[in-house]
Image (cartoon, helix red, strand yellow):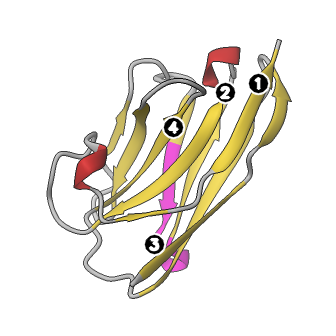
Amino acid sequence: QVQLVESGGGLVQAGGSLRLSCAASGRVFSVYAMGWFRRAPGKEREFVSAITWSGGSTNYADSVKGRFTISRDNAKNTVYLQMNSLKTEDTAVYYCALLRVTRVIANSDTYDYWGQGTKVTVSS
């Protein structure tokens, strides 16, 4: 089993920044990628960003490109999401997820493990 624990959420004004962290523990091996998803109030869960564990290739949703940066620290089994120029529409619960094998990286249904989520609120 793998446990994922997110941190770093909070309340920030529009234009501000936050850095989310997700630490993986347990049987962390054979990881293909880790990703971030979010669910805004009244909306479906959506893909935000993902990074492959070995090569560090990154993917971003169009809505966050140029504002968010995903990174990882393999030694710490941790993935980060640096969020800059935050907008009110970024308000959501952000979830970290782990994908063990090569699958569609932006599809939440393919991920194997999920964190409990961290809430991000962006005020105007």
| Residue 61 located left or right of residue 6 | left
Q: Residue at x 22, y 53 (%)?
A: 110
Q: Any magenta on residue 94?
A: no
| Residue 85 drawn above or below residue 4 | above
User: What distance separates the C-alpha of mark 4 from that of mark 3?
Assistant: 23 Å
| Residue 48 drawn above or below residue 67 | below
Instruction: Evaluate if marks 1 and 4 touch, with contact meaning CB atoms under 8 Å apart.
Output: no
Q: Residue at x 55, y 24 (%)?
A: 42
Give the numbered dot on residue 122.
1
Q: Which residues are magenta?
A: 70-77
- Considering the numbered disc 4 on the image, is that residue within a helix, a strand or a loop? strand
Name the N-terminal-most of marks 2 and 4: 4
Q: Nearer the viewer, mark 4 or mark 3?
A: 4
If the image is split into quadrants, where does the C terminus sit?
Answer: top right
User: What distance separates the C-alpha of mark 3 from that of mark 2?
Assistant: 28 Å
Q: Amino acid at mark 3?
A: Asn
Name the N-terminal-most of marks 4 and 3: 4
Q: Which residue is mark 4?
A: 38
Q: Which residue is mark 2?
A: 91
